[in-house]
Image (cartoon, rainbow, N blue to C red):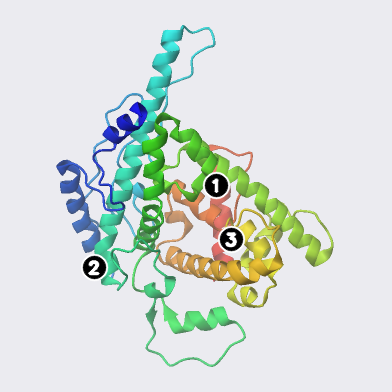
């Protein structure tokens, strides 16, 4: 009971009716500041020129040993969403040797707990700021403002004034001829998408923090991403999700290869054969005619299902619609990415997110630092060239 009271006191700055949170006056004043920048940024994206708003970075949390900070929500360009849509930095103290005194070990664990509390507080603040900043943009697009749903991709398209072309066997090219992505930029699109994604997880995530206290990181590591906003996922949790994605994709693609050619050999991470299969999985004409088993394998390879070993009727009845919506999301994201400057304009952190969203788990396995980023950039460039 005492632990619950302590955690409630730590999170007393948040309103119990989430996702509408009440923060201290200092933060409420700051969110109005960058809200104005985002609104002006979106309005300027409709014209011929784009004025870059001034920086409004939030001050870093002065907690030791964590260096987590509330990142700026200003849209600095047309392709990279604000840093506040990604997890902040988490730095924990160095581990002690086994021979360390008991008092030092106690201080170490207290410092680790404080680092995670600071990290989670920063993540929650970023969720609040991102959602508040997305409200005027949602209203301007005609999206319900107070429903934390991800906006469908068709709302970001403007119908072309040209006459409808004749029917083509390639439905994807026909749809591109009818629609023109001119209503927003990738940075704005990703801000709206990630803000809605994180707000939906606020209530269960905050309840876990209140009830579990310092044990929350272990509970969240076990539950996975279903209840954790993206801004609150610590490095070990992200790495676990990547490892699981690699295992799921290898099993799903091996099963797909066995069903198609009788061979259970995986095509190899990052290979052209693997990309060809992944690109086929997000083609809307393939999704429409694929069997339930094929839909399940596609969803598992793209991270939309935990396993492909499920009854075939579930693929046709439940997962086909999910895969179709995800394919529309990736098609729009690809188009906006090309219009925003391509892969070369993406930040390193955004490269990792974009590659994993397209099923590129394991493409840079065994590489680190700049070499891993270079491999991912090449993979994403090939993907964009295929999805034209």
Please tell me whether mark 1 sits on a helix, a strand or a loop.
helix
Depicted 2 relative to depicted 84: above or below: above
> Which residue: 60% across, 82% down?
170
Circle count: 3
- Closer to us: 331 or 213: 213
Q: Residue furthest right?
A: 262
Depicted 63 relative to depicted 276: above or below: above
Crowd class of label 3 (few under 14; some 14 to 19; many from 20; radius 10 Å) = few
Q: Residue furthest front?
A: 1
Q: Earlier in the sequence, mark 1 or mark 3?
A: 1
Please tell me whether mark 2 sits on a helix, a strand or a loop.
helix
Which label is found at residue 43? 2
Q: Earlier in the sequence, mark 3 or mark 2?
A: 2
Please tell me whether mark 3 sits on a helix, a strand or a loop.
helix
> Which residue: 45% across, 42% down?
233
Which quadrant of the view contains residue 79?
A: bottom left
Residue of label 1: 374
Task: State which quarter of the image contains the N terminus.
Answer: top left
Where residue 73 sits: x, y (%)? 29, 50
Crowd class of label 2 (few under 14; some 14 to 19; many from 20; radius 10 Å) = some
Residue of label 3: 382
Where residue 368 sits: x, y (%)? 56, 37
Which label is found at residue 310? none
Say whether residue 355 is visible. yes
> Which residue: 54% across, 39% down?
222
Specify whether 226 is left or right of 269.
left
Where residue 376 sits: x, y (%)? 56, 50
Specify whether 344 is left or right of 243.
left
Say whether residue 363 is visible. no
Task: State which quarter of the image contains the C terminus.
Answer: bottom right
């Amino acid at each position: 009971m005492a632990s619950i009271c302590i955690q409630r006191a730590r999170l007393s700055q948040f309103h119990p009716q989430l996702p509408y949170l009440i923060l201290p006056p200092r933060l409420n004043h700051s969110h109005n500041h960058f809200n104005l920048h985002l609104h002006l940024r979106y309005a300027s994206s409709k014209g011929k020129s784009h004025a870059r708003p001034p920086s409004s970075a939030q001050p870093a949390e002065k907690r030791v040993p964590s260096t987590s900070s509330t990142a700026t929500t200003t849209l600095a360009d047309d392709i990279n969403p604000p840093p506040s849509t990604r997890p902040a930095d988490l730095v924990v103290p160095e581990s002690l040797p086994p021979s360390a005194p008991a008092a030092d070990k106690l201080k170490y664990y207290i410092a680790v707990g404080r680092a995670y509390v600071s990290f989670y507080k920063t993540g929650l603040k970023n969720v609040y700021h991102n959602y508040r900043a997305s409200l005027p943009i949602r209203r301007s697009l005609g999206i319900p403002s107070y429903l934390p749903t991800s906006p469908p991709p068709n709302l970001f398209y403007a119908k072309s004034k040209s006459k409808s072309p004749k029917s083509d066997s390639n439905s994807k090219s026909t749809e591109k001829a009818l629609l023109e992505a001119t209503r927003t930029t990738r940075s704005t699109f990703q801000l709206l998408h990630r803000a809605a994604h994180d707000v939906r997880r606020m209530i269960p995530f905050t309840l876990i923090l209140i009830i579990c206290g310092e044990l929350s990181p272990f509970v969240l590591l076990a539950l996975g991403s279903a209840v954790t906003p993206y801004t609150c996922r610590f490095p070990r949790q992200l790495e676990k999700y990547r490892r699981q994605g690699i295992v799921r994709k290898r099993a799903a693609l091996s099963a797909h290869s066995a069903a198609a050619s009788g061979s259970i050999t995986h095509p190899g991470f990052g290979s052209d054969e693997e990309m060809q299969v992944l690109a086929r999985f997000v083609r809307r004409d393939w999704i429409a005619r694929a069997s339930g088993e094929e839909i399940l394998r596609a969803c598992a390879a793209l991270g939309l299902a935990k396993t492909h070993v499920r009854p075939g009727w579930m693929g046709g009845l439940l997962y086909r619609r999910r895969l179709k919506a995800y394919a529309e999301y990736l098609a729009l994201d690809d188009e906006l990415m090309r219009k925003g400057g391509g892969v070369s304009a993406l930040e390193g952190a955004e490269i990792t997110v974009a590659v994993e969203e397209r099923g590129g788990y394991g493409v840079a396995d065994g590489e680190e630092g700049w070499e891993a980023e270079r491999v991912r950039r090449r993979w994403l460039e090939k993907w964009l060239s295929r999805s034209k």
